[in-house]
Image (cartoon, coloured by chain):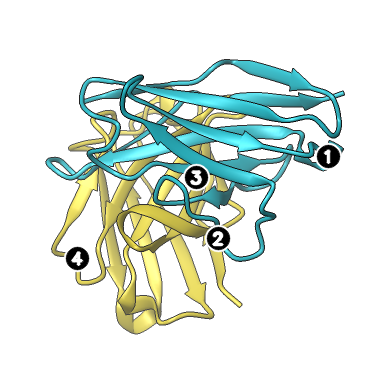
Chain colours: A yellow, B cyan
Amino acid sequence: EVQLVESGGGLVQPGRSLRLSCAASGFTFDDYGMHWVRQVPGKGLEWVSGINWNSVNIGYADSVQGRFTVSRDNGKNSLYLEMNSLRLEDTALYYCAKGSRGWGQVDHWGQGTLVTVSA
Amino acid sequence: NFMLTQPHSVSESPGKTVTISCTRSGGNIATNYVQWYQQRPGSAPTNVIYEDDQRPSGVPDRFSGSIDRSSNSASLTISGLKTEDEADYYCQSYDMSDLNWVFGGGTKLTVL
């Protein structure tokens, strides 16, 4: 059974940093791309970043480009999101999602970790 | 980049059929596959359609997807509506030139 467990969320002040992690199990991690998608409570889904299986292809939403860095450790079956210069508008539930066929889709989602940026 | 536009909400009665549209502005709907995700309140999204019209295993065949090049849109159709289908539905596609994904704004389906 595919399991994705996010961690690292919490309350942080504007301008500070936070690192999210996603522990994956139940599938061959280094066979698949991975993505981060966020959702402001009560609002829609927003793609944040994605990384392919070998970290060669990496993409970021314009809203986080230059501030967030995605990475993965295939030896540890883990995905990360380093978030710097956090803004109030980064407050959201951050989901980790497992890629499926090609870059543009995912087939499993974690339950999310909540990031709250507040003074 | 491009945008995907969905109706904010739709409602229909149990047993009926509903179709949710997803219109692409900026580029051709057929350029990259469209996915559809269902999100029930308090839960993470789940995939109900991938690659325009494919159903993941475990998704009932009451769910179907299609694209229409003439209207540059994708559609999710749910037949034989059940109260458990009440959820938010999001379409999603991507752009391989910059690797960005785009989600539609979501459609709240009410089954009443």
Per the image, label 4 sits on a secondary structure element best described as loop
Q: Are marks 3 and 1 on the same chain?
A: no
Query: CA gap, disc 2 to disc 4?
Result: 26 Å
Which residue is depicted at the point 41% across and 45% down?
B52
Return the residue at label 1.
B82
Query: CA gap, disc 1 to disc 4?
Result: 42 Å
Return the residue at label 4.
A55
* Relative to B54, residue B35 above or below: above
Q: Are marks 3 and 4 on the same chain?
A: yes
Query: CA gap, disc 1 to disc 2?
Result: 19 Å
Disc nearest the viewer among 3 and 1: 1
Query: CA gap, disc 3 to disc 2?
Result: 24 Å
Return the residue at label 3.
A94
The chain letter under disc 2 is: B
Seen in the image, is B13 located left or right of residue A85? right
Return the residue at label 2.
B56
Counting other residues with Cα less than 10 Å from the Cα at mark 1, is it few (<14), some (14-19), or many (20 or more)? some
Seen in the image, is B100 located left or right of residue B34? left
**Residues marked 1 and 4 touching at CB (< 8 Å):** no
